[in-house]
Image (tube, rainbow, N blue to C red):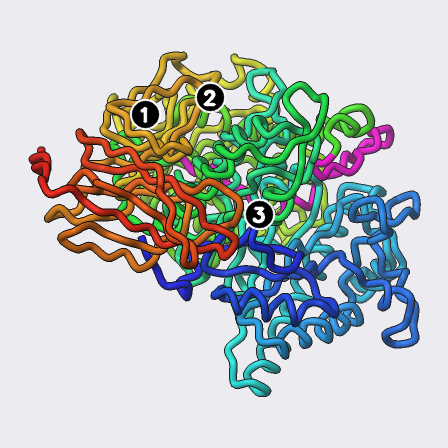
């Protein structure tokens, strides 16, 4: 388990100065914000052994000196994002912090601020959340950008589907432009001035969440910027508990939504050399939930992320200060309380376990076939209802769901066209991966791992016609494509390549929807709904809007039957269609499992042991674990991870473990972690201890320990002390216990 911090497998972000109570002992820390305290904050975290990065907002922040004209003598309040009523779109309520239109001038201002951080010696910079709200697009700065980009006068985004689509496409371009210029300039500065290779990362919500919350961001467009080194997938309870509709019921489905969100973010780096960290948050931005609520949803997101083994780097927490120093409503609502000690211990166990997830993946045969559901950045471009009498869509950011339900457009927020294509399969245990259609033309063979794809152009559009050449070839080579759509989306009528007449006479072409063009490439022009052969592959067309599939069990069943029938047409009478009510994956000795609600069974899932429950603060050893629907588990397979030769080895700990040394008389190690909390560790231990002590400074104290004779493991409990470090000393009795024979 000991590892080099330079691997940067785990990290967290924090705006406050160093404090021993939230010294999590990850590999790196992202010091948040650029102000006069930043150099000292960087120095202190470095002093504590961390690799230090900087994180700052690129769409919002304390920019008043720029807005008021103190920087260059020109006021810039006209660069604040504004809505249709001319009101600024704000980040929070007080103080007044507007989201910005990323103009060239604004980019220069941000560059000057980042230069200060480069001078302070940070090794990497994270420019978080490049966000432009769909409700925006009405400020004077945006109107000027429209004129320069489209070479025509600005059109209000609400005027038509075409105006909305073009407005959002411009918003994505503007943030792509500012990031490209900013990162390239600062990399050049760091190399010339300090002979240092500076890295840039973009922490960003998932494409699914941004589309659902009606925010525009570059997303996959960042893949084309050579100055970007990777991303943080900002997925947490606040994004994943956003309600959606399945079989007619609107409710929170945190695990399922998180599973899809982490899946689409993995696609940003699949097949590249770029880094991705998956984020988890033990609480969330909404401060009105109880610790029990935070904990159960946190565990759902952790398990959802671990079911995507292509990523093994993690941001274990944003803002640990608000976790370990904050107070939240008690279960009965009568008061506020600090984090329960058991939850604090569990959090540290999970956080340190995440640093050890670069493991060989063991998948079951029934999960070998994944279904890809295609989506594209253009899904963000059509998130405004074009009807003249459409209600005010509102602004949803997860912090006031009750208020939005009363005043906002919940139907739009539901994002049912997407969930109508994914939840019916996911809920029956079919591994579903949202795939980036835009990547099809970026990476040869991008679709090669998949035999089954689901597609609908009723909620996004293909940006280029050559995407269809690749899709058609994939089908002819033996793929199964299920297309769902009735060509009713008003955004089919935007100014686009499929409805712009090209050529003359018999060579002219114009289509009412991009589906018609795709079907023509498949030699299926004019076919009726149903299953059709195309080369070695098959195409199934459901002539129905995908949102309808979310409204009832009949709709969900229709999609499932269509996918199964299409697979039968391709694979024969025994297609690889295996429904189940759980997901389960093994990564090295770690077993990750989630049992689904609203699925094909309400039975418990039993996992045989011996296993250690890593979500249990006691790190208990179990002969078997039973999970009921709605529950998740992260387990350690004791026999799969057992070291040879009776060696002592870490199974799990709520500390960073270093300098583990074993001798004939026992073993010792150094444990590092937050002050003022109960720490625990379970280790393989071939001999029953005679005594256990932990030493803080010059003071030795007895530690609580429990030896498990059956598994030959020992549980140790201790504290890190005010200095965030303790040395644990374990002495053995003379007689040994024979190690169990391997199966």
Report crowding for label 3: few under 14, some 14 to 19, many 20 or more residues within 10 A (C-alpha).
many
Image quarter for residue 605? top left
Q: Secondary structure at mark 1?
A: loop
In this figure, which residue is indicated by the disc labeled 1?
Answer: 577
Is residue 469 among what the camera can see? no
57 sits left or right of 3 in the view = right
Report how far apart the C-alphas of labels 3 and 2 lie in the structure.
23 Å
Quick check: marks 3 and 2 in contact, CB under 8 Å? no
Asked which secondary structure carries label 3, the reply is loop
Crowding at mark 1 (Cα within 10 Å: few <14, some 14-19, many 20+)? some
**x then y, percent, for residue 177:** 68, 66
Q: Provide the residue designation for mark 2.
A: 630
Mark positioned earlier in the residue sequence (3 or 1): 3
Residue 238: x percent and y percent?
63, 36
Segment colored magenta: 371-399
Q: Residue at x 52, y 81 (%)?
A: 196
Instruction: State whether residue 582 is above or below residue 100.
Output: above
Which of the 4 image quadrants contains residue 180? bottom right
- Classed neighbour count for the residue bearing mark 2: other residues with Cα under 10 Å, few (<14), some (14–19), many (≥20): some
Q: Secondary structure at mark 2?
A: loop
Image quadrant in which you'd find residue 589:
top left
Q: Earlier in the sequence, mark 3 or mark 2?
A: 3
Looking at the figure, which quarter contains the C terminus? Answer: top left
What residue is at 58 percent from the left and 27 percent from the top? 293
Any magenta on residue 396?
yes
Q: Is residue 418 magenta?
A: no
Residue 223, relative to residue 324: is it above or below? below
Q: CA distance from mark 1 to mark 2?
A: 23 Å
- Residue to which mark 3 is pinned: 234
Q: Main secondary structure of the magenta part?
A: loop
């Amino acid at each position: 388990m000991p590892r080099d911090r330079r691997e940067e497998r785990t990290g967290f972000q924090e705006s406050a100065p160093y404090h021993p109570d939230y010294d999590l002992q990850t590999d790196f820390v992202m010091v948040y914000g650029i102000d006069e305290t930043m150099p000292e904050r960087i120095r202190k975290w470095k002093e504590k052994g961390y690799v230090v990065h900087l994180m700052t907002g690129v769409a919002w922040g304390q920019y008043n000196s720029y807005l008021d004209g103190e920087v260059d003598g020109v006021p810039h309040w006209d660069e604040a994002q504004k809505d249709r009523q001319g009101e600024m779109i704000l980040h929070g309520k007080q103080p007044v912090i507007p989201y910005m239109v990323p103009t060239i001038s604004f980019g220069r201002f941000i560059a000057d601020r980042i230069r200060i951080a480069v001078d302070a010696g940070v090794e990497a910079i994270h420019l978080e959340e490049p966000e432009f709200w769909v409700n925006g697009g009405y400020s004077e700065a945006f109107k000027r950008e429209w004129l320069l980009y489209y070479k025509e006068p600005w059109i209000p985004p609400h005027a038509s589907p075409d105006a909305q689509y073009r407005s959002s496409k411009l918003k994505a371009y503007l943030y792509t432009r500012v990031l490209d210029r900013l990162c390239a300039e600062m990399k050049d500065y760091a190399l010339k001035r300090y002979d240092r290779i500076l890295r840039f990362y973009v922490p960003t919500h998932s494409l699914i969440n941004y589309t659902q919350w009606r925010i525009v961001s570059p997303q996959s467009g960042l893949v084309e910027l050579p100055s970007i080194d990777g991303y943080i997938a900002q997925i947490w309870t606040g994004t994943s508990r956003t309600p959606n509709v399945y079989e007619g019921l609107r409710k929170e489905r945190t695990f399922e939504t998180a599973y899809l969100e982490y899946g689409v973010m993995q696609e940003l780096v699949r097949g590249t050399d770029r880094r991705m960290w998956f984020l988890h948050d033990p609480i969330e931005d909404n401060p009105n939930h109880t610790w029990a609520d935070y904990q159960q949803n946190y565990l759902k997101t952790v398990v959802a992320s671990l079911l995507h083994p292509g990523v093994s780097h993690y941001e274990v927490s944003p803002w640990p200060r608000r976790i370990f120093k904050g107070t939240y409503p008690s279960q009965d609502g009568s008061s506020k309380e600090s984090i329960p000690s058991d939850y604090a211990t569990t959090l540290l166990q999970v956080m340190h376990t995440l640093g050890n997830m670069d493991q060989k993946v063991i998948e079951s045969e029934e999960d070998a076939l994944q279904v890809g559901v295609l989506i594209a950045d253009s899904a963000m471009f059509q998130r405004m209802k074009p009807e003249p009498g459409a209600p005010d869509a509102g602004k949803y950011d997860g912090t006031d769901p009750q208020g939005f339900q009363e005043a906002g457009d919940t139907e739009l927020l539901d994002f049912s066209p997407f969930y109508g294509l994914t939840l019916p399969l996911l809920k029956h245990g079919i591994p579903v991966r949202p795939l980036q259609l835009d990547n099809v033309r970026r990476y040869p063979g991008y679709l090669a791992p998949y035999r089954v794809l689901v597609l609908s152009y009723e909620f996004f559009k293909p940006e280029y016609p050559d995407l269809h050449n690749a899709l058609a070839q994939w089908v002819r080579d033996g793929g199964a494509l299920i297309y769902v759509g009735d060509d009713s989306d008003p955004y089919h009528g935007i100014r686009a390549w499929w409805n712009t007449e090209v050529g003359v006479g018999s060579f002219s072409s114009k289509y009412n929807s991009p589906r018609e063009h795709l079907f023509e490439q498949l030699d299926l022009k004019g076919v009726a709904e149903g299953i059709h052969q195309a080369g070695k592959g098959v195409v199934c067309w459901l002539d129905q809007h995908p949102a309808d599939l979310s409204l009832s069990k009949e709709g969900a069943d229709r999609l499932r039957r269509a996918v199964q029938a299409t697979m039968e047409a391709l694979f024969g009478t025994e297609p690889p269609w295996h429904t189940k009510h759980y997901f389960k994956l093994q990564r090295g000795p770690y077993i990750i499992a989630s049992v689904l609600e609203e699925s094909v069974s309400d039975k418990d899932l039993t996992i045989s042991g011996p296993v250690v429950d890593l979500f249990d603060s006691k790190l208990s050893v179990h002969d078997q674990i039973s999970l009921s629907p709605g529950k998740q588990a992260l387990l350690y397979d004791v026999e799969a991870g057992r070291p040879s030769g009776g060696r002592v080895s870490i199974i799990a700990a709520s500390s960073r473990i270093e300098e583990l040394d074993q001798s004939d008389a026992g073993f010792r190690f150094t444990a590092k972690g937050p002050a003022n909390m109960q720490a625990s560790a379970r280790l393989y231990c071939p001999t029953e201890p005679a005594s256990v002590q932990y030493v803080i400074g010059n003071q030795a104290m007895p530690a609580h320990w429990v030896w498990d004779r059956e598994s030959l493991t020992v549980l140790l409990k201790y504290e890190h002390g005010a200095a965030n470090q303790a040395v644990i000393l374990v002495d053995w009795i003379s007689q040994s216990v024979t190690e169990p024979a391997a199966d």
